[in-house]
Image (cartoon, grey):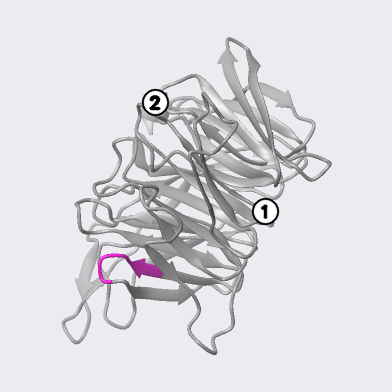
Amino acid sequence: SGLERPQVVAHVQQALSYTLFDCKWVPRSARLLCLGSAARGTGLLQLYELRGGRLALLREIEKAKPIKCGTFGATSLQQRYLATGDFGGNLNIWNLEAPEIPVYSVKGHKEIINSIDGVGGLGIGEGAPEIVTGSRDGTVKVWDPRQKDTPVANMEPVQGESKRDCWTVAFGNAYNQEERVVCAGYDNGDIKLFDLKTMSLRWETNIKNGVCSVEFDRKDVNMNKLVATSLEGKFHVFDMRTQHPTKGFASVSEKAQKSTIWQVRHLPQNRDIFMTSGGAGSLHLWKYEYPAQRSKKDSEGAEMGVAGSVSLLQNVTLSTQPISSLDWSPDKKGLCVCGAFDQTVRVLIVTKLNKV
């Protein structure tokens, strides 16, 4: 019933004077970060605190290059260092208490870093703290902040293969000290799953459309589900539990809207609920339903996965411009921040999430 459906409530909105590319909650706090590009081509990092019904600007830091993306995923809860990727291909790690000089810096790529993710920090995922960066230069690199200058893994096109613009990267499968994967999505629709334990390509597919965002429902469990969103308004949910030798992973796809789905983010407190953000300035809240049986045997007796279904819980249009970034609060269920190209950051509250 409509009474029981979650509602997406715009709690606070703040106009910005620059282009916003990414926004992130600071773990264990009522603070959030906005990352982007000033009109004069420099990078901006703004730290806000949620105070009742408004956002108070605590700090604004200007950097040489526009900042495209950020993550807290490879830091401890004590330090809460932010890793960022910028337009110059630099990976920097910042102590927000003393942000003048990065605590770690490397010229990671020849071109813009489009996407970044972290694992092994914040008490999420086993193993070493690592950061993955995906760039327009076609490479995907994994960094250990304890190791200077050289990546611990470098996934690049083989000789003779054309280099594709990597738009999105995500860690997964980090459920023990040895296992870990990186999923990368490219401008031509390629999705590649790299196994960091064996340093090999574990699986690849193509969704026939630029891959804007990929995310596992959890980084710190045995691979369970992966959502990939695309340029033409479709998203695909792959069941990652069972890999068939030739067919790969079972998936269900949904045409969510007519325009690009910029991002997907799973609710930290319930991995079967996720939000997609769209080119038409809208947010869609989805729930995944598992099938009665998640695998079956094919005619040869090989195990193959069975895809579930997705249902739309709620949708809301907030902006006339694309919503390009989205982040759930890791601490407060239903608290969310999104940034749009109308140069506005919005803090949202999603109600009734315990009822679905």
Q: Is residue 2 visible?
A: yes
Q: Quadrant of the C terminus?
A: top left
Which residue occupies the extreme top position in the image? Answer: 52
Question: Which residue is at the front of the view, 38 or 354?
Answer: 38
What residue is shown at x 57% (from left), y 36% (from top)?
101
The residue indicated by pointer 2 is: 331
Q: Residues within 10 Å of mark 2 (few under 14, many from 20)?
A: some
* Quarter of image, res 188: bottom right
Where residue 175 appears, as percent x and y from the top left, is: 22, 51
* Quarter of image, res 78: top left
Question: Which residue is at the front of the view, 232 or 99?
Answer: 99
Q: Are marks 1 and 2 in contact (CB under 8 Å)?
A: no
Question: Which residue is at the front of the view, 189 or 45?
Answer: 45
Indicate which disc, 1 or 2, sits on the residue closer to the N terminus.
1
Q: Amino acid at mark 2?
A: Asp
Q: Amino acid at mark 1?
A: Phe
Where residue 90 appears, as percent x and y from the top left, is: 59, 53
Indicate left or right for 296 with 167 as reference. left
Q: Is residue 229 visible?
A: no
What residue is shown at x 52% (from left), y 30% (from top)?
336
Q: Residues within 10 Å of mark 1 (few under 14, many from 20)?
A: many
Magenta segment? 193-198
- Mark 1, mark 2: which one is toward the viewer? 1
Vertical comparison of 346 with 238: above or below: above
The residue indicated by pointer 1 is: 87
Vertical comparison of 97 with 116: above or below: above
